[in-house]
Protein backbone atom coordinates (compact mmCIF):
# COMPACT_ATOMS: atom_id res chain seq x y z
CA UNK A 1 0.00 0.00 0.00
CA UNK A 2 1.66 3.20 -1.21
CA UNK A 3 0.46 6.53 0.12
CA UNK A 4 1.51 9.91 -1.20
CA UNK A 5 2.32 12.65 1.28
CA UNK A 6 -0.08 15.56 0.64
CA UNK A 7 1.72 18.64 -0.67
CA UNK A 8 0.39 20.80 2.16
CA UNK A 9 1.73 18.52 4.92
CA UNK A 10 4.47 20.83 6.16
CA UNK A 11 4.16 20.30 9.91
CA UNK A 12 3.03 17.66 12.39
CA UNK A 13 -0.33 19.39 12.79
CA UNK A 14 -1.04 18.87 9.08
CA UNK A 15 -0.54 15.13 9.42
CA UNK A 16 -2.89 15.14 12.41
CA UNK A 17 -5.56 16.94 10.39
CA UNK A 18 -5.36 14.44 7.51
CA UNK A 19 -5.22 11.55 10.00
CA UNK A 20 -8.63 12.42 11.42
CA UNK A 21 -10.06 12.91 7.93
CA UNK A 22 -8.87 9.54 6.64
CA UNK A 23 -8.74 7.05 9.51
CA UNK A 24 -11.77 5.12 10.73
CA UNK A 25 -13.10 7.02 13.78
CA UNK A 26 -12.94 3.96 16.04
CA UNK A 27 -9.30 3.30 15.13
CA UNK A 28 -8.51 6.99 15.51
CA UNK A 29 -10.06 6.92 18.98
CA UNK A 30 -7.62 4.17 19.95
CA UNK A 31 -4.50 5.47 18.22
CA UNK A 32 -4.89 9.13 19.12
CA UNK A 33 -7.32 9.16 22.02
CA UNK A 34 -6.76 9.95 25.69
CA UNK A 35 -8.03 8.81 29.06
CA UNK A 36 -11.30 10.05 30.54
CA UNK A 37 -11.82 13.77 29.81
CA UNK A 38 -8.48 14.31 28.09
CA UNK A 39 -7.27 16.82 30.68
CA UNK A 40 -3.74 15.46 30.85
CA UNK A 41 -3.50 15.12 27.08
CA UNK A 42 -4.36 18.81 26.69
CA UNK A 43 -2.07 19.77 29.56
CA UNK A 44 0.88 18.23 27.72
CA UNK A 45 0.35 20.60 24.81
CA UNK A 46 -0.61 23.63 26.89
CA UNK A 47 2.61 23.36 28.90
CA UNK A 48 4.65 24.12 25.79
CA UNK A 49 2.53 27.13 24.84
CA UNK A 50 3.20 28.73 28.24
CA UNK A 51 6.93 28.79 27.50
CA UNK A 52 8.41 31.36 25.13
CA UNK A 53 11.81 31.28 23.47
CA UNK A 54 14.39 34.05 23.89
CA UNK A 55 16.37 34.75 20.71
CA UNK A 56 20.03 35.66 20.63
CA UNK A 57 21.52 37.68 17.78
CA UNK A 58 24.89 37.53 16.06
CA UNK A 59 26.05 34.31 17.71
CA UNK A 60 28.82 32.19 16.22
CA UNK A 61 27.15 29.10 14.76
CA UNK A 62 30.15 27.62 13.04
CA UNK A 63 30.33 23.88 13.55
CA UNK A 64 26.72 23.76 14.70
CA UNK A 65 25.32 20.31 15.43
CA UNK A 66 22.36 18.72 17.23
CA UNK A 67 24.20 15.42 17.65
CA UNK A 68 24.58 13.55 20.92
CA UNK A 69 25.59 10.19 22.36
CA UNK A 70 22.84 8.52 24.37
CA UNK A 71 23.51 5.26 26.21
CA UNK A 72 26.36 4.55 23.84
CA UNK A 73 24.42 5.35 20.66
CA UNK A 74 25.63 8.21 18.45
CA UNK A 75 22.55 10.07 17.26
CA UNK A 76 22.32 13.07 14.91
CA UNK A 77 19.33 14.50 16.81
CA UNK A 78 17.89 14.15 20.32
CA UNK A 79 14.68 12.66 18.93
CA UNK A 80 13.43 9.10 19.47
CA UNK A 81 10.21 7.35 18.49
CA UNK A 82 8.13 6.48 21.54
CA UNK A 83 6.74 2.96 21.98
CA UNK A 84 3.24 2.65 20.56
CA UNK A 85 1.06 -0.39 19.99
CA UNK A 86 -0.40 -1.82 16.79
CA UNK A 87 1.10 0.29 13.99
CA UNK A 88 -0.79 -1.87 11.52
CA UNK A 89 -3.95 -0.09 12.63
CA UNK A 90 -2.47 2.97 10.92
CA UNK A 91 -0.90 1.28 7.88
CA UNK A 92 -0.71 -2.32 6.60
CA UNK A 93 3.12 -2.24 6.64
CA UNK A 94 2.97 -1.39 10.33
CA UNK A 95 6.05 -1.19 12.52
CA UNK A 96 8.32 -2.30 9.70
CA UNK A 97 7.45 0.87 7.76
CA UNK A 98 8.06 3.00 10.84
CA UNK A 99 11.37 1.25 11.51
CA UNK A 100 12.51 1.75 7.93
CA UNK A 101 11.72 5.46 8.17
CA UNK A 102 13.61 5.60 11.47
CA UNK A 103 16.59 3.94 9.79
CA UNK A 104 16.52 6.44 6.91
CA UNK A 105 16.51 9.38 9.32
CA UNK A 106 18.91 7.77 11.83
CA UNK A 107 16.31 7.87 14.58
CA UNK A 108 16.11 5.38 17.45
CA UNK A 109 12.73 3.63 17.36
CA UNK A 110 11.34 2.09 20.54
CA UNK A 111 9.39 -1.02 19.60
CA UNK A 112 6.37 -1.80 21.76
CA UNK A 113 5.71 -5.15 23.38
CA UNK A 114 2.25 -4.68 21.85
CA UNK A 115 3.61 -4.32 18.32
CA UNK A 116 1.53 -5.83 15.55
CA UNK A 117 4.63 -7.43 14.00
CA UNK A 118 7.27 -9.57 15.67
CA UNK A 119 10.11 -7.79 17.40
CA UNK A 120 12.55 -9.84 15.31
CA UNK A 121 11.01 -8.80 11.97
CA UNK A 122 11.01 -5.14 13.01
CA UNK A 123 14.65 -5.28 14.08
CA UNK A 124 15.61 -6.86 10.77
CA UNK A 125 14.59 -3.88 8.62
CA UNK A 126 16.75 -1.28 10.38
CA UNK A 127 20.51 -0.99 10.70
CA UNK A 128 20.18 1.95 13.08
CA UNK A 129 19.88 0.98 16.77
CA UNK A 130 16.47 0.27 18.25
CA UNK A 131 15.13 0.00 21.81
CA UNK A 132 12.52 -2.48 23.03
CA UNK A 133 9.68 -1.53 25.36
CA UNK A 134 8.59 -4.05 27.98
CA UNK A 135 5.79 -4.63 30.47
CA UNK A 136 6.69 -6.76 33.47
CA UNK A 137 4.94 -10.12 33.23
CA UNK A 138 3.51 -11.97 36.27
CA UNK A 139 6.31 -14.52 35.92
CA UNK A 140 9.95 -13.37 35.96
CA UNK A 141 10.82 -16.20 33.58
CA UNK A 142 8.24 -14.99 31.08
CA UNK A 143 9.54 -11.43 31.35
CA UNK A 144 13.07 -12.65 30.73
CA UNK A 145 11.98 -14.62 27.68
CA UNK A 146 10.96 -11.33 26.04
CA UNK A 147 14.19 -9.68 27.16
CA UNK A 148 16.27 -12.52 25.71
CA UNK A 149 14.44 -12.23 22.40
CA UNK A 150 15.21 -8.51 22.35
CA UNK A 151 18.86 -9.14 23.17
CA UNK A 152 19.20 -11.74 20.43
CA UNK A 153 17.47 -9.48 17.88
CA UNK A 154 20.01 -6.73 18.55
CA UNK A 155 18.00 -4.17 20.52
CA UNK A 156 20.25 -1.77 22.42
CA UNK A 157 18.13 -0.96 25.48
CA UNK A 158 15.06 -2.14 27.37
CA UNK A 159 12.44 0.51 28.05
CA UNK A 160 10.37 -0.67 30.99
CA UNK A 161 6.95 0.97 31.28
CA UNK A 162 6.16 1.42 34.98
CA UNK A 163 3.12 3.72 34.95
CA UNK A 164 0.47 1.34 33.61
CA UNK A 165 -0.12 -1.69 35.86
CA UNK A 166 -3.63 -1.45 34.44
CA UNK A 167 -4.86 0.37 31.38
CA UNK A 168 -6.56 3.71 31.66
CA UNK A 169 -10.27 4.30 31.31
CA UNK A 170 -10.48 5.62 27.77
CA UNK A 171 -14.00 6.84 27.17
CA UNK A 172 -13.35 7.95 23.59
CA UNK A 173 -12.58 4.35 22.63
CA UNK A 174 -15.65 3.11 24.49
CA UNK A 175 -17.93 5.62 22.77
CA UNK A 176 -16.49 4.76 19.35
CA UNK A 177 -16.86 1.04 20.02
CA UNK A 178 -13.24 0.25 19.19
CA UNK A 179 -12.37 -3.42 18.84
CA UNK A 180 -9.06 -4.75 17.60
CA UNK A 181 -9.58 -6.30 14.13
CA UNK A 182 -9.15 -10.07 13.95
CA UNK A 183 -6.20 -9.61 11.58
CA UNK A 184 -4.21 -7.51 14.07
CA UNK A 185 -2.90 -8.68 17.42
CA UNK A 186 -0.03 -8.31 19.85
CA UNK A 187 1.92 -10.99 18.02
CA UNK A 188 4.82 -10.94 20.47
CA UNK A 189 2.38 -11.98 23.20
CA UNK A 190 0.46 -14.61 21.25
CA UNK A 191 0.95 -17.23 23.92
CA UNK A 192 -1.03 -18.01 27.08
CA UNK A 193 2.05 -17.26 29.17
CA UNK A 194 2.06 -13.58 28.22
CA UNK A 195 -0.21 -10.84 29.53
CA UNK A 196 -0.52 -7.08 29.22
CA UNK A 197 -2.54 -4.46 31.11
CA UNK A 198 -6.23 -4.80 30.44
CA UNK A 199 -8.86 -2.11 30.14
CA UNK A 200 -11.00 -2.00 33.27
CA UNK A 201 -14.57 -2.28 32.01
CA UNK A 202 -17.05 -2.55 34.83
CA UNK A 203 -15.00 -4.97 36.96
CA UNK A 204 -12.93 -4.17 40.03
CA UNK A 205 -9.46 -3.02 38.98
CA UNK A 206 -7.74 -4.40 42.07
CA UNK A 207 -8.69 -7.95 41.11
CA UNK A 208 -6.08 -7.96 38.32
CA UNK A 209 -3.40 -6.75 40.74
CA UNK A 210 -4.15 -9.19 43.54
CA UNK A 211 -1.80 -11.99 42.46
CA UNK A 212 1.09 -9.87 41.23
CA UNK A 213 1.64 -6.16 41.54
CA UNK A 214 5.07 -5.13 40.18
CA UNK A 215 7.46 -3.56 42.70
CA UNK A 216 10.88 -1.93 42.69
CA UNK A 217 12.33 -5.33 43.59
CA UNK A 218 11.06 -6.65 40.25
CA UNK A 219 12.74 -3.73 38.50
CA UNK A 220 16.01 -4.44 40.30
CA UNK A 221 15.87 -8.11 39.28
CA UNK A 222 15.30 -7.13 35.65
CA UNK A 223 18.20 -4.67 35.67
CA UNK A 224 20.48 -7.34 37.10
CA UNK A 225 19.34 -9.96 34.62
CA UNK A 226 20.28 -8.21 31.36
CA UNK A 227 23.44 -6.57 30.04
CA UNK A 228 21.28 -4.04 28.23
CA UNK A 229 20.64 -0.67 29.90
CA UNK A 230 17.14 -0.50 31.40
CA UNK A 231 15.35 2.82 30.94
CA UNK A 232 12.24 3.43 33.02
CA UNK A 233 9.30 5.09 31.27
CA UNK A 234 6.61 6.75 33.33
CA UNK A 235 8.51 8.76 35.94
CA UNK A 236 6.43 11.78 36.93
CA UNK A 237 6.97 12.09 40.68
CA UNK A 238 10.42 13.13 41.99
CA UNK A 239 9.89 10.68 44.87
CA UNK A 240 10.28 7.83 42.37
CA UNK A 241 13.75 8.92 41.22
CA UNK A 242 15.72 7.47 44.14
CA UNK A 243 14.10 4.00 44.07
CA UNK A 244 14.41 3.95 40.27
CA UNK A 245 18.14 4.64 40.35
CA UNK A 246 18.66 2.33 43.32
CA UNK A 247 17.04 -0.46 41.31
CA UNK A 248 19.61 0.03 38.56
CA UNK A 249 17.87 2.18 35.95
CA UNK A 250 20.30 3.69 33.43
CA UNK A 251 17.86 6.29 32.16
CA UNK A 252 14.48 7.82 33.00
CA UNK A 253 11.65 8.97 30.77
CA UNK A 254 9.47 11.70 32.23
CA UNK A 255 6.04 10.71 30.96
CA UNK A 256 2.36 10.61 31.85
CA UNK A 257 1.76 7.99 29.15
CA UNK A 258 0.52 10.67 26.78
CA UNK A 259 -2.51 11.22 28.98
CA UNK A 260 -3.76 7.74 28.07
CA UNK A 261 -3.71 6.09 31.51
CA UNK A 262 -4.64 8.38 34.43
CA UNK A 263 -6.38 11.64 33.62
CA UNK A 264 -5.72 14.66 35.81
CA UNK A 265 -1.95 14.23 35.96
CA UNK A 266 0.33 17.24 35.43
CA UNK A 267 2.01 17.81 32.09
CA UNK A 268 5.26 15.94 31.57
CA UNK A 269 7.02 19.22 30.75
CA UNK A 270 5.89 20.82 34.01
CA UNK A 271 7.40 17.97 36.03
CA UNK A 272 10.62 17.76 34.02
CA UNK A 273 12.64 20.33 36.05
CA UNK A 274 11.77 18.59 39.32
CA UNK A 275 12.83 15.22 37.93
CA UNK A 276 16.09 16.51 36.47
CA UNK A 277 16.88 18.24 39.77
CA UNK A 278 16.38 14.96 41.63
CA UNK A 279 18.46 13.01 39.09
CA UNK A 280 21.30 15.55 39.29
CA UNK A 281 22.98 14.30 36.13
CA UNK A 282 23.40 10.70 37.27
CA UNK A 283 21.55 9.21 34.27
CA UNK A 284 20.04 10.60 31.05
CA UNK A 285 16.53 12.03 31.33
CA UNK A 286 14.13 11.98 28.38
CA UNK A 287 10.75 13.67 27.97
CA UNK A 288 7.66 12.12 26.41
CA UNK A 289 4.33 13.85 25.84
CA UNK A 290 3.09 16.75 23.74
CA UNK A 291 5.99 17.16 21.29
CA UNK A 292 4.67 18.59 18.02
CA UNK A 293 7.38 21.03 16.91
CA UNK A 294 11.14 21.44 16.88
CA UNK A 295 10.57 24.41 19.16
CA UNK A 296 8.92 22.02 21.65
CA UNK A 297 12.05 19.89 21.57
CA UNK A 298 14.22 22.94 22.27
CA UNK A 299 12.01 23.91 25.22
CA UNK A 300 12.30 20.42 26.69
CA UNK A 301 16.08 20.48 26.33
CA UNK A 302 16.18 23.91 27.96
CA UNK A 303 14.37 22.49 30.99
CA UNK A 304 16.88 19.68 31.37
CA UNK A 305 15.91 16.82 29.04
CA UNK A 306 18.73 15.05 27.22
CA UNK A 307 16.36 13.95 24.45
CA UNK A 308 12.66 13.59 23.66
CA UNK A 309 10.32 10.88 22.48
CA UNK A 310 7.68 11.51 19.82
CA UNK A 311 4.54 9.40 19.81
CA UNK A 312 1.20 10.22 18.19
CA UNK A 313 2.63 12.40 15.37
CA UNK A 314 4.49 9.34 14.08
CA UNK A 315 1.28 7.33 13.84
CA UNK A 316 -0.49 10.28 12.20
CA UNK A 317 2.24 10.44 9.56
CA UNK A 318 2.25 6.65 9.11
CA UNK A 319 -1.50 6.62 8.47
CA UNK A 320 -1.35 9.51 6.02
CA UNK A 321 1.88 8.87 4.15
CA UNK A 322 3.19 5.46 5.12
CA UNK A 323 6.95 5.04 5.33
CA UNK A 324 7.51 8.30 3.42
CA UNK A 325 5.21 10.15 5.78
CA UNK A 326 7.11 9.04 8.88
CA UNK A 327 10.48 9.88 7.32
CA UNK A 328 9.12 13.29 6.29
CA UNK A 329 7.66 13.98 9.75
CA UNK A 330 10.95 13.13 11.46
CA UNK A 331 12.87 15.28 8.99
CA UNK A 332 10.51 18.19 9.67
CA UNK A 333 11.15 17.95 13.41
CA UNK A 334 14.89 17.73 12.85
CA UNK A 335 14.85 20.80 10.61
CA UNK A 336 12.65 22.77 12.99
CA UNK A 337 14.97 21.97 15.90
CA UNK A 338 18.01 23.17 13.96
CA UNK A 339 16.24 26.40 13.02
CA UNK A 340 15.17 27.00 16.62
CA UNK A 341 18.70 26.35 17.89
CA UNK A 342 20.17 28.74 15.34
CA UNK A 343 17.67 31.51 16.10
CA UNK A 344 18.26 31.25 19.84
CA UNK A 345 22.02 31.26 19.29
CA UNK A 346 22.72 27.72 20.45
CA UNK A 347 25.17 25.94 18.18
CA UNK A 348 25.29 22.67 20.12
CA UNK A 349 23.05 20.80 22.52
CA UNK A 350 25.37 21.53 25.43
CA UNK A 351 24.80 25.26 24.81
CA UNK A 352 21.07 24.90 25.53
CA UNK A 353 20.14 25.98 29.06
CA UNK A 354 17.25 27.53 30.97
CA UNK A 355 18.15 30.93 29.51
CA UNK A 356 16.58 29.80 26.24
CA UNK A 357 13.05 30.05 27.66
CA UNK A 358 10.87 32.46 29.58
CA UNK A 359 7.42 31.76 31.01
CA UNK A 360 4.62 33.82 29.53
Image (tube, rainbow, N blue to C red):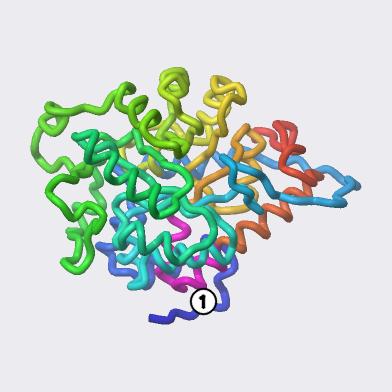
Instruction: Give left or right: position of 285 versus 312.
Output: right
Query: Does residue 253 belong to the magenta stretch?
Result: no
Magenta region, residue range? 312-329
Quick check: 147 above or below 331? above
Q: Nearer the viewer, residue 273 or 217?
A: 217
Quick check: 217 above or below 231? above
Answer whether residue 123 is visible to the viewer in this image.
yes
Residue 37 on image: x %, y %: 31, 42
The quadrant where residue 139 appears:
top left
The secondary structure that dominates the magenta segment is: helix
Q: Residue at x 20, y 59 (%)?
A: 178
Residue 250 on image: x %, y %: 50, 31
Residue receiving disc 1: 5
Q: Quadrant of the N terminus?
A: bottom left
Instruction: Give left or right: position of 340 versus 98.
Output: right
Instruction: Give left or right: position of 331 versus 18.
Output: right
Q: Residue at x 26, y 52 (%)?
A: 172
Query: Does residue 323 belong to the magenta stretch?
Result: yes
Secondary structure at badge 1 equals loop
Residue 295 on image: x %, y %: 64, 49
Q: Quadrant of the C terminus?
A: top right
Residue 252 on image: x %, y %: 48, 33
The quadrant where residue 177 appears:
bottom left
Q: Residue at x 41, y 41 (%)?
A: 159
Amino acid sequence: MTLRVPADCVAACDYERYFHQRVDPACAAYLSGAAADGLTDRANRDAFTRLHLLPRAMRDLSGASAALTLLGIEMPYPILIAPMAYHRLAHPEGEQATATAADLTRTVMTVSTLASQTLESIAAVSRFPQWFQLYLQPSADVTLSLVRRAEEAGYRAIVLTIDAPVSGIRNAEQRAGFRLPASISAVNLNSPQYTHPQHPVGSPVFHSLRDHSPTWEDVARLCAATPLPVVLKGILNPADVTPALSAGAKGLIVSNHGGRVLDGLPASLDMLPLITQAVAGRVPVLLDGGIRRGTDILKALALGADAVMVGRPVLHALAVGGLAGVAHLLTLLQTELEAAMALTGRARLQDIDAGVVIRG
